[in-house]
Amino acid sequence: MTKRPPTPTPETQPYWDGAKVGELRLQRCADCGDAYSPPRPFCPACHSRDVRWFKASGRATLYSYVINHRPRADWPRQPHSIAIVELAEGPRLVSNIVGIPQTPADLKIDMPLQVVFEKLSDDIYLPVFAPAAPSVTVDNP
């Protein structure tokens, strides 16, 4: 069984177009500067309609999660996380954590994450998050 792909709307189409080319796109208010998600035609902070799409960094941290041991029939049968990730740009998204065992010992709050894209159909790529590669520090003697 596979996940059912979402159906884009005119307001969310730029988000899905970005995901298809490996970009996590968000909206930002041109008046107050607030970045937000999910997409909508007005800023949730100041209600301005002067909003613009931009390419987000894809960096995030794990804010919260639950491990679902009883997935829906259209999802794989193994346990999976349902997570809230906090993007470097500020907004929080509901997503899944992949590439790591789905256990409390491995899913650590505040762990650094990076967006990856899971292909659901030819047109829909779902942003999910994987542990970010550790940064390498080089000591100069």
Image: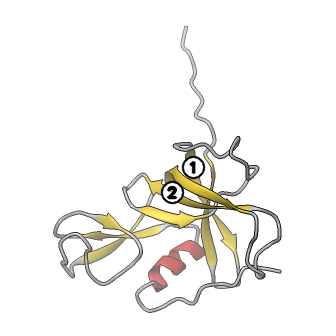
Q: Alpha carbon of mark 1 to alpha carbon of mark 2: how far?
A: 8 Å
Q: Marks 1 and 2: CB-CB under 8 Å?
A: yes
Q: Is residue 109 left or right of residue 76?
A: left
Q: Amino acid at mark 1?
A: Leu
Q: Is residue 51 left or right of residue 38?
A: left
What residue is at 58 percent from the left and 34 percent from the top? 135
Q: Considering depth in this image, is 17 or 90 the residue closer to the camera?
A: 90
Q: Considering depth in this image, is 75 or 87 the residue closer to the camera?
A: 75
Identify the coloring.
secondary structure
Number of residues whose C-alpha sits closer than 10 Å to that of mark 1, classed few (under 14), some (14–19) or many (20 or more)? many
Q: Where is mark 1, residue-wise?
A: 113
Residue 44, placed above or below residue 101: below
Q: Where is mark 2, residue-wise?
A: 85
Q: Position of residue 45 (x, y in %)?
A: 22, 69
Q: Quadrant of the C terminus?
A: top right
Circle 1 or circle 2, nearest the eye = 2
- Residue most toward the top? 141
Q: Quadrant of residue 134?
A: top right
Q: Position of residue 27 (x, y in %)?
A: 35, 71
What secondary structure is marked by label 2?
A: strand
Q: Position of residue 106 (x, y in %)?
A: 70, 43
